[in-house]
Image (cartoon, rainbow, N blue to C red):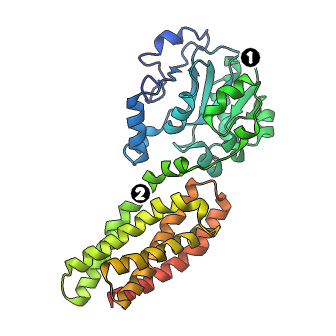
Amino acid sequence: MANACCCGEQTTCCSGASSQASAVKPPVEQIPIISTQFTRADMLKNWKVRWGIGRMSAIVTPGIYGIGQPDANSPVLVTANYRLTLDALRKELGGISAWILVLDTRGVNVWCAAGKGTFGTEELIARINAVKLHDIVAHRTLILPQLGATGVAAHEVLKASGFKVIYGPVRAKDLPAFLQNGLKKTAEMSTVEFTLSDRLAVVPVEIVQAVKPTFIVFAIFWLLRSLIAWQIDLASGFAFLWAYLGAMLVGTVIFPILLPYLPSRSFAVNGALLGVAWGIVSSAINQFSLQESIAATLVLAALTSFFSMNFTGSTTFTSLSGAKLEVKTATPILAVCAIIGLVIGVI
């Protein structure tokens, strides 16, 4: 994060922020000021993180930071210590002076961390006390992102710390208008959307997670098939490899694109339907025999469904409890289908 003092391990002001730091009066003159400018270097870093490169470097040191020239009356915005989340917040705050209270969410975004409990009541209270927020601001109001509401009990925070919790807009881009409007939200600010661009934003990490086991699974299947047939069949091996890669892409790319238009509320069912379609198409392209087509369709349907279920952690289309129940219910069925398909394919 260029010119952002929270990207390192030490909470000291970095180059480009020292001139602003003087605006913060004692006893908080050492609080780092972070930039609202979002540079090409920031974009590159975030792009790499989305593709799983340097993911652990995207964890921000928890604590208190400043934007602009904050004083005792400046608003306090609460967020997670995931760099992409902080970047999404800070780049919308140009021309605004505010404090940013960063919670320790183990480097997870606000919505996911709220579901896991790390963006929660206990951590918020502990962080208020750790940074001595009572000594930094004269007011007793915290602005939390709306998507973090499931993890925070506002009444407990008020009772334990004296700070009142107000839930801000869903999107960081609406914060300036929210602050200018006396901390009041419009209906649009409260509406949770999951647009095509939102869905595509999480595709890279889904692909990366899917690629890791891909070649291991394929290698085992091809080795078994070759040993039983007692010959190395490169053409058949590559045919199944392309079929497998296709299932991975259907489950990680096509599924999120088509998500709002698929017929079932079940991610597993929708993924299986797409997998069956891909199994039929890939069998026709590769000119599989009937037996190979049945095997491929069973395996590809199970794989596509499994990859699709991984998307439950990235979407607003389901709840944490619903996702857990679906995974628990569907996984054994998918495993049986895959095993049957593998057995038929090996034979």
Please name whichever residue, 183 or 15, is drawn nearer the observer in this view of the structure.
183
Query: From the viewer's perspective, is residue 316 above or below residue 298?
Result: above
Query: From the viewer's perspective, is residue 197 above or below residue 96?
Result: below
Q: Position of 270 compared to 232: left or right?
A: right
Name which residue type carries label 1: Ala
Q: Residue at x 49, y 51 (%)?
A: 200
In the rendered structure, which disc, 2 or 1, sits on the residue that comes first in sequence? Answer: 1
Mark 2 or 1: the one toward you: 2
Q: Position of residue 114 (x, y in %)?
A: 64, 47
Label 1: few (<14), some (14–19) or many (≥20) C-alpha neighbours in 10 Å = few
As helix, strand or loop, the secondary structure at mark 2 comes to: helix
Q: Are marks 2 and 1 in contact (CB under 8 Å)?
A: no
CA separation, marks 2 and 1?
A: 47 Å
As helix, strand or loop, the secondary structure at mark 1 comes to: loop
Q: Quadrant of the C terminus?
A: bottom left
Please name whichever residue, 58 or 87, is drawn nearer the observer in this view of the structure.
87
Q: Quadrant of the N terminus?
A: top left
Name which residue type carries label 2: Ile
Q: Residue at x 77, y 24 (%)?
A: 182
Which residue is label 2 attached to?
207
Q: Position of 281 compared to 199: left or right?
A: left
Please name whichever residue, 321 or 170, is drawn nearer the observer in this view of the structure.
170
Query: From the viewer's perspective, is residue 76 above or below residue 58?
Result: above
Q: Position of residue 62 (x, y in %)?
A: 55, 33
Q: Residue at x 43, y 46 (%)?
A: 50
Q: Residue at x 57, y 61 (%)?
A: 259
Please name whichever residue, 187 or 206, is drawn nearer the observer in this view of the structure.
187
- Looking at the image, how many numbered discs can be counted on the residues? 2
Which residue is label 1 attached to?
138
